[in-house]
Image (tube, grey):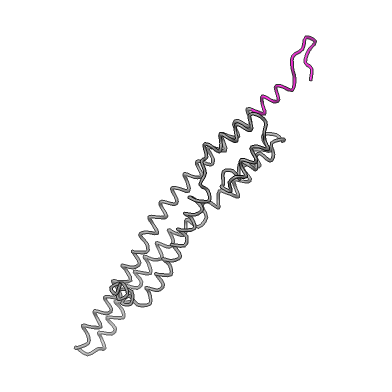
Amino acid sequence: MDGIVLFFRQGGWFMYIILGIGLFGLAIIVERMIVIFIKNRIDSVAFSNQIIENIQVGNIDGALRVCDRSKAALPQIVRAGLERADEGLQDIQNAIELKAMSIIPKLEKRTGYLSMTANVATLLGLLGTIWGLITSFQAVAHADASQKAALLSSGIAMAMNTTAFGLMVAIPCMVFFAFLHEKTNDLIDEINENVARIFQYFAKTKSKNAEKVYEPKESGWQK
Protein backbone atom coordinates (compact mmCIF):
# COMPACT_ATOMS: atom_id res chain seq x y z
CA MET A 1 0.00 0.00 0.00
CA ASP A 2 2.83 2.38 0.86
CA GLY A 3 4.40 1.62 -2.51
CA ILE A 4 1.19 2.61 -4.30
CA VAL A 5 0.96 5.88 -2.37
CA LEU A 6 4.61 6.66 -3.13
CA PHE A 7 4.10 5.81 -6.79
CA PHE A 8 1.13 8.17 -6.94
CA ARG A 9 2.87 11.03 -5.15
CA GLN A 10 6.02 10.81 -7.28
CA GLY A 11 3.90 11.20 -10.40
CA GLY A 12 2.86 14.71 -9.45
CA TRP A 13 -0.42 16.46 -10.17
CA PHE A 14 -0.81 14.74 -13.56
CA MET A 15 -1.68 11.58 -11.63
CA TYR A 16 -4.84 13.21 -10.26
CA ILE A 17 -6.02 14.13 -13.74
CA ILE A 18 -5.37 10.63 -15.05
CA LEU A 19 -7.15 9.20 -12.00
CA GLY A 20 -10.19 11.37 -12.79
CA ILE A 21 -10.17 10.12 -16.38
CA GLY A 22 -9.93 6.54 -15.09
CA LEU A 23 -12.91 7.01 -12.76
CA PHE A 24 -14.89 8.48 -15.67
CA GLY A 25 -14.10 5.41 -17.75
CA LEU A 26 -15.03 3.10 -14.87
CA ALA A 27 -18.40 4.82 -14.50
CA ILE A 28 -19.11 4.28 -18.21
CA ILE A 29 -18.10 0.61 -17.99
CA VAL A 30 -20.39 -0.04 -15.01
CA GLU A 31 -23.34 1.83 -16.57
CA ARG A 32 -23.00 0.05 -19.92
CA MET A 33 -22.67 -3.35 -18.23
CA ILE A 34 -25.91 -2.70 -16.34
CA VAL A 35 -27.74 -1.66 -19.51
CA ILE A 36 -26.54 -4.56 -21.66
CA PHE A 37 -26.36 -7.45 -19.18
CA ILE A 38 -29.07 -6.57 -16.64
CA LYS A 39 -31.71 -4.25 -18.12
CA ASN A 40 -31.70 -6.03 -21.50
CA ARG A 41 -31.22 -9.55 -20.15
CA ILE A 42 -34.00 -11.61 -21.71
CA ASP A 43 -34.48 -15.02 -23.32
CA SER A 44 -35.25 -13.65 -26.76
CA VAL A 45 -36.15 -17.02 -28.28
CA ALA A 46 -38.66 -17.86 -25.54
CA PHE A 47 -40.08 -14.33 -25.72
CA SER A 48 -40.50 -14.50 -29.50
CA ASN A 49 -42.16 -17.90 -29.28
CA GLN A 50 -44.70 -16.59 -26.76
CA ILE A 51 -45.47 -13.57 -28.94
CA ILE A 52 -45.88 -15.74 -32.05
CA GLU A 53 -48.17 -18.19 -30.23
CA ASN A 54 -50.43 -15.33 -29.15
CA ILE A 55 -50.42 -13.78 -32.62
CA GLN A 56 -51.36 -17.08 -34.26
CA VAL A 57 -54.49 -17.41 -32.09
CA GLY A 58 -55.32 -13.72 -32.44
CA ASN A 59 -54.63 -12.93 -28.78
CA ILE A 60 -53.01 -9.51 -29.18
CA ASP A 61 -53.81 -8.55 -25.59
CA GLY A 62 -51.94 -11.63 -24.40
CA ALA A 63 -48.95 -10.67 -26.55
CA LEU A 64 -49.00 -7.17 -25.08
CA ARG A 65 -49.00 -8.62 -21.57
CA VAL A 66 -45.93 -10.69 -22.48
CA CYS A 67 -44.19 -7.50 -23.61
CA ASP A 68 -45.11 -5.71 -20.39
CA ARG A 69 -43.19 -8.26 -18.32
CA SER A 70 -39.85 -6.73 -19.31
CA LYS A 71 -38.43 -3.27 -19.94
CA ALA A 72 -35.79 -4.64 -22.32
CA ALA A 73 -35.36 -3.21 -25.81
CA LEU A 74 -36.88 -6.17 -27.69
CA PRO A 75 -40.26 -6.17 -25.89
CA GLN A 76 -40.54 -2.39 -26.25
CA ILE A 77 -39.98 -2.54 -30.00
CA VAL A 78 -42.36 -5.48 -30.48
CA ARG A 79 -45.00 -3.77 -28.37
CA ALA A 80 -44.99 -0.76 -30.70
CA GLY A 81 -45.97 -3.07 -33.57
CA LEU A 82 -48.60 -4.93 -31.54
CA GLU A 83 -50.30 -1.65 -30.66
CA ARG A 84 -50.97 -1.22 -34.41
CA ALA A 85 -52.19 -4.80 -34.89
CA ASP A 86 -55.56 -3.65 -36.25
CA GLU A 87 -53.91 -1.57 -38.96
CA GLY A 88 -52.08 -2.53 -42.15
CA LEU A 89 -48.70 -4.26 -42.33
CA GLN A 90 -47.02 -1.07 -43.49
CA ASP A 91 -48.32 0.82 -40.45
CA ILE A 92 -47.10 -1.98 -38.17
CA GLN A 93 -43.68 -1.96 -39.80
CA ASN A 94 -43.44 1.84 -39.55
CA ALA A 95 -44.31 1.70 -35.84
CA ILE A 96 -41.65 -0.94 -35.22
CA GLU A 97 -38.99 0.98 -37.14
CA LEU A 98 -39.85 4.25 -35.40
CA LYS A 99 -39.57 2.63 -31.97
CA ALA A 100 -36.32 0.91 -32.93
CA MET A 101 -34.87 4.26 -34.01
CA SER A 102 -35.44 5.59 -30.49
CA ILE A 103 -34.35 2.43 -28.60
CA ILE A 104 -31.29 1.14 -30.50
CA PRO A 105 -29.15 4.31 -30.11
CA LYS A 106 -29.60 4.05 -26.33
CA LEU A 107 -27.88 0.65 -26.43
CA GLU A 108 -24.84 2.18 -28.16
CA LYS A 109 -24.83 5.37 -26.07
CA ARG A 110 -21.58 6.38 -24.34
CA THR A 111 -19.65 3.24 -25.34
CA GLY A 112 -17.52 5.32 -27.70
CA TYR A 113 -16.34 7.44 -24.78
CA LEU A 114 -14.26 4.50 -23.57
CA SER A 115 -12.06 4.71 -26.64
CA MET A 116 -11.67 8.45 -26.10
CA THR A 117 -10.87 7.86 -22.40
CA ALA A 118 -8.10 5.42 -23.30
CA ASN A 119 -6.56 7.87 -25.77
CA VAL A 120 -6.76 10.80 -23.36
CA ALA A 121 -5.21 8.79 -20.52
CA THR A 122 -2.32 7.74 -22.76
CA LEU A 123 -1.73 11.28 -23.98
CA LEU A 124 -1.88 12.68 -20.44
CA GLY A 125 0.68 10.09 -19.37
CA LEU A 126 2.93 11.17 -22.24
CA LEU A 127 2.41 14.83 -21.39
CA GLY A 128 3.31 14.08 -17.77
CA THR A 129 6.46 12.37 -18.97
CA ILE A 130 7.53 15.36 -21.03
CA TRP A 131 6.65 17.76 -18.23
CA GLY A 132 8.65 15.72 -15.72
CA LEU A 133 11.71 15.64 -17.96
CA ILE A 134 11.52 19.38 -18.65
CA THR A 135 11.14 20.11 -14.93
CA SER A 136 14.04 17.86 -13.98
CA PHE A 137 16.42 19.29 -16.57
CA GLN A 138 15.53 22.86 -15.61
CA ALA A 139 16.10 22.07 -11.95
CA VAL A 140 19.42 20.36 -12.64
CA ALA A 141 20.66 23.30 -14.69
CA HIS A 142 20.42 25.69 -11.74
CA ALA A 143 21.13 23.31 -8.83
CA ASP A 144 24.28 22.56 -6.88
CA ALA A 145 26.26 19.50 -7.86
CA SER A 146 25.21 17.72 -4.67
CA GLN A 147 21.52 18.17 -5.46
CA LYS A 148 21.57 17.35 -9.14
CA ALA A 149 21.22 13.58 -8.73
CA ALA A 150 18.23 13.88 -6.38
CA LEU A 151 16.45 16.43 -8.61
CA LEU A 152 17.09 14.40 -11.74
CA SER A 153 15.83 11.25 -10.04
CA SER A 154 12.67 13.02 -8.88
CA GLY A 155 11.92 14.36 -12.35
CA ILE A 156 12.50 11.01 -14.04
CA ALA A 157 10.26 9.30 -11.46
CA MET A 158 7.48 11.75 -12.28
CA ALA A 159 8.01 11.15 -15.99
CA MET A 160 7.92 7.37 -15.78
CA ASN A 161 5.09 7.16 -13.25
CA THR A 162 2.69 9.28 -15.30
CA THR A 163 3.37 7.18 -18.39
CA ALA A 164 2.82 3.96 -16.47
CA PHE A 165 -0.38 5.20 -14.81
CA GLY A 166 -1.74 6.50 -18.11
CA LEU A 167 -1.26 3.06 -19.66
CA MET A 168 -2.76 1.37 -16.60
CA VAL A 169 -5.93 3.38 -17.21
CA ALA A 170 -5.89 3.18 -21.02
CA ILE A 171 -5.44 -0.57 -21.46
CA PRO A 172 -8.52 -1.69 -19.44
CA CYS A 173 -10.60 1.02 -21.13
CA MET A 174 -9.63 -0.27 -24.57
CA VAL A 175 -10.32 -3.88 -23.57
CA PHE A 176 -13.76 -3.04 -22.19
CA PHE A 177 -14.51 -0.83 -25.20
CA ALA A 178 -13.90 -3.75 -27.56
CA PHE A 179 -15.87 -6.13 -25.33
CA LEU A 180 -18.89 -3.84 -24.87
CA HIS A 181 -18.90 -2.82 -28.53
CA GLU A 182 -19.06 -6.47 -29.57
CA LYS A 183 -21.76 -7.34 -27.03
CA THR A 184 -23.83 -4.33 -28.08
CA ASN A 185 -23.66 -5.36 -31.73
CA ASP A 186 -24.65 -8.92 -30.78
CA LEU A 187 -27.64 -7.57 -28.84
CA ILE A 188 -28.75 -5.37 -31.74
CA ASP A 189 -28.44 -8.28 -34.19
CA GLU A 190 -30.48 -10.46 -31.82
CA ILE A 191 -33.18 -7.78 -31.60
CA ASN A 192 -33.34 -7.34 -35.38
CA GLU A 193 -33.52 -11.09 -35.95
CA ASN A 194 -36.36 -11.65 -33.50
CA VAL A 195 -38.33 -8.58 -34.59
CA ALA A 196 -38.11 -9.76 -38.21
CA ARG A 197 -39.24 -13.26 -37.18
CA ILE A 198 -42.24 -11.91 -35.27
CA PHE A 199 -43.19 -9.55 -38.09
CA GLN A 200 -43.02 -12.44 -40.58
CA TYR A 201 -45.57 -14.42 -38.55
CA PHE A 202 -47.66 -11.26 -38.21
CA ALA A 203 -47.76 -10.94 -41.99
CA LYS A 204 -48.68 -14.62 -42.44
CA THR A 205 -51.48 -14.39 -39.88
CA LYS A 206 -52.94 -11.27 -41.48
CA SER A 207 -52.75 -12.89 -44.90
CA LYS A 208 -54.65 -15.98 -43.69
CA ASN A 209 -57.28 -13.84 -42.01
CA ALA A 210 -57.76 -11.86 -45.21
CA GLU A 211 -58.35 -15.08 -47.18
CA LYS A 212 -61.06 -16.14 -44.71
CA VAL A 213 -63.07 -13.00 -45.28
CA TYR A 214 -64.55 -14.54 -48.45
CA GLU A 215 -65.72 -18.15 -48.72
CA PRO A 216 -66.62 -19.94 -52.01
CA LYS A 217 -70.34 -20.66 -52.55
CA GLU A 218 -72.15 -22.33 -55.42
CA SER A 219 -73.60 -19.04 -56.49
CA GLY A 220 -70.28 -17.19 -56.27
CA TRP A 221 -68.36 -15.43 -53.49
CA GLN A 222 -70.20 -14.37 -50.40
CA LYS A 223 -68.90 -12.32 -47.48
Q: Position of residue 216 (x, y in %)?
A: 74, 14
Q: Residue furthest top?
A: 218
Q: Position of 211 compared to 22: left or right?
A: right
Q: Position of residue 121 (x, y in %)?
A: 39, 66
Vertical arrangement, residue 26 with respect to residue 204, above or below: below
Q: Position of 94 compared to 41: left or right?
A: right
Vertical arrangement, residue 3 with respect to residue 209, above or below: below
Report the residue at 38% width, 77% height from top: 13
209 is within the stretch colored magenta: yes
Q: Position of residue 212 (x, y in %)?
A: 71, 21
Magenta residues (range): 205-223
User: To which quarter of the image does residue 159 belong?
Assistant: bottom left
Check the picture and name the quadrant holding the C terminus: top right
Q: Position of residue 91 (x, y in %)?
A: 68, 38
User: To which quarter of the image does residue 98 belong?
Assistant: top right
Report the residue at 38% width, 74% height from top: 14
> Front-most of 13 and 148?
13
> Front-most of 151 and 137?
151
42 is within the stretch colored magenta: no
Check the picture and name the quadrant holding the N terminus: bottom left
> Front-most of 33 and 98?
33
